[in-house]
Amino acid sequence: ASYKAAVDRQLNFFQQELQEDLIRLERLNNNHLYHPELVAKAITQLVFHMGAKVIDLPIDQRAEVAEQTMIMIRMILEGARHLDEAKIR
């Protein structure tokens, strides 16, 4: 149980740091993310999951997973920037 708690604490720390960075970067670029806390959570969980997946893959397949992960992150960010237009909050 202590290992799981330690992992959860670390993920929460990454999430908080990412949220702060996303808010700062979006302001610098004159963009606005809706629900930056959920964006940070989604990205953190995605990267953690994809990182765990890639451990068991042959080295030649890792670049494809990395590329897919980057595309997914861009999709999350773009979606969060346009949430207001979709009237989903």
Image: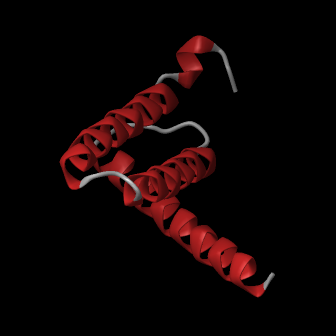
Question: Which residue occupies 26% across, 49% down?
Answer: 62
Q: Is residue 8 above or below residue 3?
A: above
Q: Nearer the viewer, residue 11 or 66?
A: 66
Question: Which residue occupies 51% across, 47% down?
Answer: 46
Q: Is residue 52 above or below residue 89?
A: below
- Which quadrant holds residue 30? top left
Q: Is residue 86 above or below residue 4?
A: above
Q: Say left or right for 61 vs 7.
A: left
**Residue 82 percent location from the top left of the image:** 48, 22
**Residue 26 percent location from the top left of the image:** 37, 46
Count of numbered labels shown in the rendering: 0
On-image quarter of the N terminus: bottom right
- Which quadrant holds residue 88? top right
Q: Nearer the viewer, residue 57 or 74?
A: 57
Question: Which residue occupies 55% across, 63% down?
Answer: 15
Find the residue positioned furthest to the bottom. 2
On-image quarter of the C terminus: top right
**Residue 52 percent location from the top left of the image:** 48, 58
Q: Say left or right for 51 vs 58.
A: right
**Residue 18 percent location from the top left of the image:** 46, 61
